Image: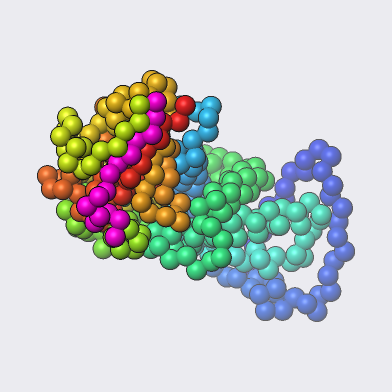
Amino acid sequence: MSRIRIPRLPRAAGAPDIPLPEPPAALRRGPLREGAFGSALHDPRTAVVVGRLLGPAFAVCFLTGVLSHLMQHQPGWLALPSRPVWGYRVTQGLHVATGIAAVPLLLVKLWVVYPRLFAWPPARSVRHALERLSVAVLVAAAVFELAGGLLNIVQWYPWPFPFVPVHYWIGWVVTGALVLHIAVQLPTIVGHWRRARGTAVPQAVDGPSRRGLMAALGASVGVVTLATVGQSFSPLGKVSLLAPRRPGVGPQGLPVNKTAAGAGVLAPIRDPAWRLTVVGPRGFSVSREELLAMPQHTVTLPIACVEGWSASASWTGVRIRDLLERAGAPEHATLRVFSLERFSPYAVMEMRREYARDPLSLLALSLNGEPLAEDHGYPARVIAPNRPGVLQTKWVSRMEVVL
Ligand SMILES: Nc1nc2c(c(=O)[nH]1)N[C@H]1C(S)=C(S)[C@@H](COP(=O)(O)O)O[C@H]1N2
Ligand SMILES: [Mo]
């Protein structure tokens, strides 16, 4: 059995390539001895084949993740469209689906390449040591992102730091390390493509078992995807046994992210003296009955949670732009919305004009033909097109025109 061959890297011009001293032969035991890993599947070719699937999954996951970040923390220079209404539903559904599919892909990729952990000598040069360090960063960051993302889906936060910003920044670390990794491995990747296309494909003895590995990998990706994608793709809702939330399951046929009891708002939302206060050039305050007496509109819009589940529903209420006009807001004004919930990152939300002026953006009073359930935001909640679920503020009590 031959030792894992580590392809020689082309030397970049000017890169330091100072050879390190050879380590003593006495250390070469166990996994460090020559030929310790027998399977022919621990080869660069299999690593490339799996990498060709893992790379695109990470790319889609990263791009949709950055988009989600921009939509939740909209920078002043960026105008976001309120259409298509299902935009965020699709991009965030893809974010979570590609992240979940990447789990078996990453596990197999790590299994294929892990013998390299014991490559001997551990570093052939300073340059090689730096490369190995960048792979260590890539693996650690990728495992962190996928594990953290999965735990976030089941809303379990066993760590002391805020999940969202850390998930976001480590996403950049993964991407940077991945781009570097692909650049370093380019000779192997290109070599694989050449051989795949050319006639000189060696019909290696390991052919069937690599095919077997890829078939098993394809099957696992299929199973985890089918078991979860129904959380956003309703036709598959029934087979999505692992999805924490499914369209159609919950009060009024819609999943709940946080209950009214959990948010500690039961007392204020049940208070018959509840009023909506709108602060602006011609600010006003109205009861729920007065809101119901204003022109009502019904729209079909999805709630699309950052955690990947989404579900469409029929909402009825007052157009936000009607409230803005009544308050004398100028056309360009941003709207700030306050929930009765306190001490929550969702207690205050901002809505720029593209969303606030969209005729589909409502202060909803009813859901699927019934008065809003308490858990869905009674007495009034925001629903707007192409928005992350976290911005669909529930239990609204106050709106301010930001001039
Ligand atoms: N005040 C308040 N509004 C909120 C939330 C919250 O925790 N507090 N959760 C948000 C999130 S993350 C989502 S996905 C949607 C879910 O709406 P639903 O529970 O009515 O389905 O509400 C949003 N509005
Ligand atoms: Mo959410």
Q: Position of residue 114 (x, y in %)?
A: 59, 65
Q: Is residue 314 left or right of residue 353?
A: left
> Magenta segment range?
267-281
At 80% across and 79% down in the image, what residue appears?
26
At 28% across and 44% down in the image, what residue appears?
275
All told, the count of numbered labels is 0
Q: Is residue 330 left or right of residue 84?
A: right
227 or 39: which is nearer to us?
227
Q: Position of residue 241 (x, y in %)?
A: 26, 63
Q: Residue furthest left?
A: 369
At 81% across and 75% down in the image, what residue appears?
25
* Residue 9 visible, this angle: yes
Q: Is residue 72 left or right of residue 380?
A: right
Q: Position of residue 58 (x, y in %)?
A: 49, 47
Question: Which quadrant of the rendered structure holds the N terminus?
Answer: bottom right
Q: Is residue 249 left or right of residue 64?
A: left
306 or 275: which is nearer to us?
275
User: Is 65 contained in the magenta span?
Assistant: no
Task: State whether residue 401 is above or below residue 118.
Answer: above
179 or 327: which is nearer to us?
327
* Residue 321 visible, this angle: no
User: Quadrant of the rendered structure where residue 300 is?
Assistant: top left
At 54% across and 66% down in the image, what residue appears?
159
